[in-house]
Amino acid sequence: MTHDELIAAISILYPNAVHGRDFYVAHMVEPQTNVQLSSAFIAQWTIDGVPEPSLPELMQAVAPHVNTAKATVCARDVRWERNARLDQSDSFLTRAVEAEDAAKVTALKAYRKALRDLPLQSGFPFDVDWPELPAEA
């Protein structure tokens, strides 16, 4: 399980718990590449009145939520990429508006709408059909 998936799963199990305040999650990484070498684990647990679960207890409790956690992390990553592409297209749209190039404006507006509509795709977040940046841009 990845670092972010474990955080998401713990957040499902303990909705009022905040990573970085109530608990910390960590995992071993390869120093040169930062590739994750181990499953994530709880590095620190300070949730008042809630004893830290053992790893087997945690894995059993988290198991029903793994798919939801994976989807949460994947959706977050897709949205980050989508937002980066929206940010990138801002300058293209501004230049097209300033140049009064109606064809470019129309194409870029359609592209940006397609980006904003990504979460509505049936395969979201695991199977996303990314729109192409218009060639005119």
Image (cartoon, rainbow, N blue to C red):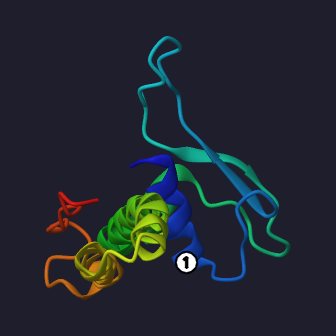
Total marks placed: 1
Quarter of the rendering containing residue 27: top right
Q: Residue 49 location, x and y as percent? A: 83, 76
Dot 1 falls on a residue whose secondary structure is helix
Q: Residue 77 vs residue 22: left or right?
A: left
User: Which residue occupies the foreground of this view, 2 or 93?
Assistant: 93
Q: Residue 133 location, x and y as percent? A: 23, 61
Q: Disc 1 marks which residue?
A: 13
Image quarter (top left, top right, bottom left or bottom right) of the C terminus: bottom left
User: Which residue occupies the foreground of this view, 20 or 119?
Assistant: 119
Residue 55, above or below 46 = above
Q: Residue at x 48, y 24 (%)?
A: 34
Q: Residue 67 vs residue 30: left or right?
A: left
Q: Residue 81 location, x and y as percent? A: 39, 58
| Outermost residue, front side | 99
User: Which residue occupies the foreground of this view, 56 or 93?
Assistant: 93
Q: Residue 53 location, x and y as percent? A: 61, 61
Name the kind of residue labelled 1 in the image. Leu
**Label 1 environment density (alpha carbons within 10 Å; few <14, some 14–19, many ≥20):** some
Residue 65, above or below 31 = below
Quarter of the rendering containing residue 48: bottom right
| Outermost residue, bottom side | 120
Q: Residue at x 51, y 61 (%)?
A: 58
